[in-house]
Image: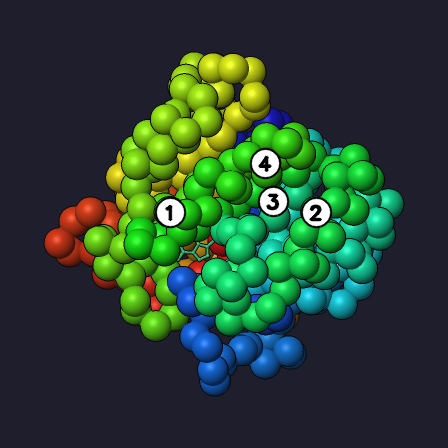
Amino acid sequence: MAVPPLIDSFGRLHDNLRLSVTDRCNIRCFYCMPEHDVRFVDRRQILDFEEIERFTRIAVSLGVSKLRVTGGEPLLRRDLPLLIRRLAAIPGVRDLALTTNGVLLPDLARALYDAGLRRLNVHLDTLDRERFRQISRRDDLERVLEGLAISRELGFRIKLNAVAVKNLVEPDIVPLACFARENGFEVRYIEFMPLDAQNLWDRRKVLLAGEVIETLSREIAPLVAVPDADPRAPATEYAYADGGGLVGFIASVSRPFCGNCNRLRLTADGKLRYCLFSIEEDDVKGLMRSGAPDECIAALIRSNLARKWEGHEINSAKFVAPPRPMYSIGG
Ligand code: SAM
Ligand code: SF4
């Protein structure tokens, strides 16, 4: 008998799963983590590879076909290439990608490629060493650039994730876009969202997608919206009119894309979330560790999705930021 697809009460089909494999990180971006005294989950509470693979197989049996591995910094997870190999081998997985800050790519890119990974999103806000240090509180820009060069050489398809923070990254917009164009990367500007650990977010600190589009169109080449881009992907894509490639905008604040959301999230400590901003979550790990059969986990996925709300309400006065910051959810 055919399994009913994962459709929520707003008619949205869910086929995309984000798997966070750790909440630890080797840098400390201010819009995600506190600078000091970060409280990480006890290692025993983190799902092991068997548990991650089991959950993924169940989700795939319900229609999930796209996976993204994230964190924290996923490359810190020991033996990550082994997990990648296992996920890539699950029948029904059509797309597997990884989001990373890139610092450990010089060491791991080859093993990840050999394990079957082909798509990387590398987080890079600036090419300026001092601003990189200011944002991430670490001096690792050279490592990230080296990791990008190695990954490109290996043949990865690469997108760059740049967080758009007002009165900070404006000088980086054009150099980063030029760097992306020269290297065949697609840069995606992500509006700063209220998911930082220190509650620094304020609407006035968001560099809006419209402003970035205006800058790039003026300074590099006119940008034209790509009409046939995947409407269910979070990024709205634009193409340079001179044929110089694509640029993406994840305009969560100025143009929320909740109406097309197709994503579920599993945190590193085994909690299922239907939204980045949800304030409730379901305990997959507890269920698995108590010996629940696959049908119970599948039922939990369906009941989680059934409670999914229409949208995140960032723009409403009743918005409440989730208790977990970005690094502990998995962006
Ligand atoms: N450590 C990896 C990284 O930085 O790419 C993966 C996890 S990180 C939480 C995933 C993405 O979230 C990053 O690429 C970054 O662009 C984005 N991000 C983090 N904090 C954010 C915030 N407050 N608003 C918008 N995007 C954010
Ligand atoms: Fe680490 Fe990524 Fe958060 Fe930056 S955005 S602190 S790299 S988890």
Image location of residue 270, percent across then percent down: 56, 64
What's the amino acid at mark 1?
A: Glu
Along the line of sight, which residue is nearer the eye, 291 or 88? Answer: 88
Name the front one of labels 1 and 2.
Answer: 1
Residue at left 34%, top 42%? 252
The circle drawn on residue 170 is 1
Q: Mark 4 points at which residue?
A: 180
Q: Which residue is drawn at 65% across and 47% down?
A: 98
Disc nearer the start of the sequence (1/2): 2
Image coords of residue 325 (percent x, y): 41, 65
Compare marks 2 and 3 and give the one earlier in the sequence.
Answer: 3
Distance in Å between CA atoms under marks 3 and 4:
12 Å
Q: Name the residue under label 3.
A: 121
| Circle on res. 79 | none
N-term-proximal mark, 4 vs 2: 2
Callouts 2 and 3 close, C-beta under 8 Å: no
Q: Measured from the top left, where is residue 104 in percent x and y?
A: 72, 61
Comparing marks 2 and 3, which lies closer to the viewer? 2
Mark-to-mark CA distance, 2 and 3: 10 Å
Residue 227 appearing in the image = yes
Mark 4: secondary structure: helix
Circle 1 sits in a helix, a strand or a loop, which is it?
A: helix
The answer to whether residue 191 is above or below residue 322 is: above
Judging from the image, what secondary structure is the residue with disc 2 in? helix
Q: Which of marks 1 and 3 is in front?
A: 1
Q: Earlier in the sequence, mark 1 or mark 3?
A: 3
Q: Which amino acid does label 2 sit on?
A: Leu
CA distance for labels 1 and 2: 22 Å
Lateral position of residue 312 relative to residue 291, left or right: left
Task: Say whether residue 89 is left or right of residue 161.
Answer: right
Tags 4 and 1 touching, CB below 8 Å: no
